[in-house]
Amino acid sequence: MKKFLCAAVFTVFFCLAAFAQDVIALRDATEIQAKVLQVGIDDISYKKWDNQDGPLYQIAKKDVLFIKYANGTKDVFNQIVPEQSVKSPAKRQVNVDSVRFNAYVDVGCIFTKGEAGPMMNVTLGFRLNDGFFIGVQSGIDALFGSPASGGAGFDMASFPLMFDFRGFFPVKNPVFRPYVECALGANFLSRLGKPIYYEGVAYDFPTMTIFRLHGGLGFEFKRATMTAGYALYHLAKENNIHCGYVKVGIRIGKLK
């Protein structure tokens, strides 16, 4: 009887000793019999159960699924997801490079050596990004002749219909934006009471279409604009009118 009790007690202690170690379960299904000494922020320090006088080991916390301690408690570790891979909730953001509607209203003066007159145009289009605008330009301008123009009279009004391109230079200060302007298209020309007479050729048509080209330099300051440049009227019969122009205006529409 006494031998039986001794054997039972030995068996119980043996079983308790067998289950007294901590178990580290890894995410790859490996189990480590250990004595866990410390659970840090990123690492877990432990010694092997069968060599507790041996070296200290560390394992990355992200590789551990759970730890089952000798007293029966358990620590379960959620998988650590790198911060950069966490998808934040979708937010509506304004894209600086998105297409935005812009309009320009300009007034000014167009002139040659012997003719001059007022001009006004409206340009409707889109700012494709911070550096480029494309639109359609129309309006009205007039050239009034003088004796210096050398003819029976040179009074005409014109109605342009052109594609307008503006390329903006990159700048650190978005308030001040220099740009290059180029406009190309047709021009509907109408006389003002007299036959149009230019460089020895009479243009006795109530209305005719001619080729027109603008090119200039300008800048935006907040919403205000100023442009100066060169304009070409290509008349019939191979005559050209070379003009200069200066105009100021205002931009309508947002940049961002």
Image (cartoon, rainbow, N blue to C red):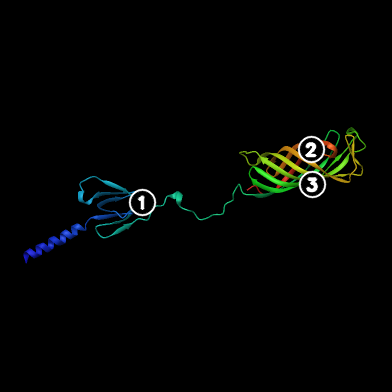
Q: Which one is earlier in the sequence, the residue at label 3 or at label 2?
A: 3
Of the image marks 3 and 1, the number of the one nearer the N terminus:
1
The mark closer to the camera, 1 or 2, is: 2
Which label sits on residue 232? 2
Contact? badges 1 and 2 (CB < 8 Å): no
Mark 2 belongs to which amino acid?
Leu
Query: Could you tell me residue 109's position as x and y percent?
Result: 80, 39
> Which callout, 1 or 2, points at the residue further toward the start of the chain?
1
Residue 106 disc label: none
Residue at x 28%, y 59% (from the top left corner): 73
Residue 237, visible in the rendered structure: yes
Instruction: Give the Cα distance between marks 3 and 1.
Output: 69 Å
What residue is drawn where x is 82% and y is 36%? 240
User: Which class describes the residues within 10 Å of circle 3: few (<14), some (14-19), or many (20+)?
Assistant: some
Q: Residue furthest bottom?
A: 1
Q: Position of residue 178 (x, y in %)?
A: 67, 38
Dividing the picture into quadrants, the one containing residue 249 is top right
The mark found on residue 62 in the picture is 1
Mark 3 and mark 2 in contact? Answer it, CB < 8 Å.
no
Instruction: Give residue 139's mark.
Output: 3
Q: Is residue 247 left or right of residue 15?
A: right
Q: Nearer the viewer, residue 98 or 223?
A: 98
